[in-house]
Image: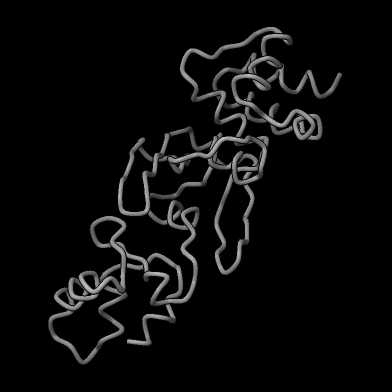
């Protein structure tokens, strides 16, 4: 069974797993057996990841989020927490996608995907390498844009109330905010929602 280790922590389909055992006829039965033995973890129908006990590699929920429903990138509170910009733990892995909004739950947690326009999607993305995993995540600026755009009822027009929201509602690291790139906010405002609020973010940094 050591051939499972070659898959490391990359999500794989049942067809890929079956391909590791060409001598077997009942490949789907083999997949079910491996899952029952705890050697693979089911992420959704037809998609699995090798358990860390078998692979010796830590599972990356960010990498799983990219594969579970895509194209997508990790964003909002999940990205801000990853960067250490908010103090609270985040228990739902939040991502943006150009497909329909969806959510998934499995033994590794809850994964939420919110839809956005294609022209907005590609702004401010970065590839992050963490250990043996590489995944697509929003930059801090894009994660903040996504959070503002997708927070229901949030449409701030004044500097003081926006800064109060960032510091006291989002609990954002304000020193880090001061170092953010305002051009990302401008670009998102051009093609996204809540243009006034996103442009106000840029105005604050450009003062």
- Visible residue check, residue 76: no
- Visible residue check, residue 34: yes
On-image quarter of the N terminus: bottom left
Query: How far across and how far down the image is residue 2, in percent?
Result: 37, 87
Residue 35 shown left or right of residue 187 in the figure? left
Q: Residue placed farthest to the right in the image?
A: 207
Query: How far across and how far down the image is residue 93, in percent?
Result: 45, 43
Judging depth in this view, the residue of 95 and 177 nearest the camera is 177
Up the image or down, 83 lies above or below 154; here it is below
* Residue at position x 25%, y 62% in the image: 46
Query: How far across and how far down the image is residue 7, in percent?
Result: 42, 76
Q: Say how many tags the image has.
A: 0
Up the image or down, 197 lies above or below 138; here it is above
Q: Quadrant of residue 185?
A: top right
Q: How is the image coloured?
A: one colour
Q: Residue placed farthest to the bottom in the image?
A: 23
Residue 108 shown left or right of residue 44 in the figure? right
On-image quarter of the C terminus: top right
Judging depth in this view, the residue of 147 and 118 nearest the camera is 147
Q: Quadrant of residue 159?
A: top right
Query: How far across and how far down the image is residue 164, in percent?
Result: 68, 14
* Residue at position x 37%, y 86% in the image: 3
* Residue at position x 81%, y 24% in the image: 205
Up the image or down, 107 lies above or below 206; here it is below
């Amino acid at each position: 069974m050591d051939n499972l280790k070659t898959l490391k922590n990359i999500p794989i389909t049942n067809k890929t797993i079956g391909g590791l055992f060409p001598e077997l006829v009942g490949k789907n039965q083999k997949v079910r057996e491996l899952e029952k033995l705890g050697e693979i973890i089911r992420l959704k129908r037809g998609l699995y990841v090798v358990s860390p006990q078998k692979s010796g590699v830590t599972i990356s929920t960010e990498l799983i989020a990219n594969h579970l429903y895509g194209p997508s990138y990790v964003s909002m509170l999940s990205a801000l927490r990853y960067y250490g910009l908010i103090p609270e733990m985040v228990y739902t892995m939040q991502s943006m996608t150009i497909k329909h909004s969806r959510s998934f739950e499995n033994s590794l947690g809850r994964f939420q995907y919110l839809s956005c326009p294609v022209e907005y999607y590609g702004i401010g993305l970065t590839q992050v390498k963490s250990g043996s995993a590489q995944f697509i995540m929003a930059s801090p600026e894009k994660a903040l844009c996504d959070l503002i755009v997708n927070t229901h009822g949030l449409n701030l027009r004044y500097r003081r109330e926006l800064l109060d929201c960032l510091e006291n509602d989002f609990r954002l690291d304000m020193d880090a905010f001061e170092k953010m790139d305002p051009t990302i906010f401008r670009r998102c405002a051009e093609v996204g929602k809540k243009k006034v609020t996103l442009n106000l973010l840029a105005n604050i940094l450009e003062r």
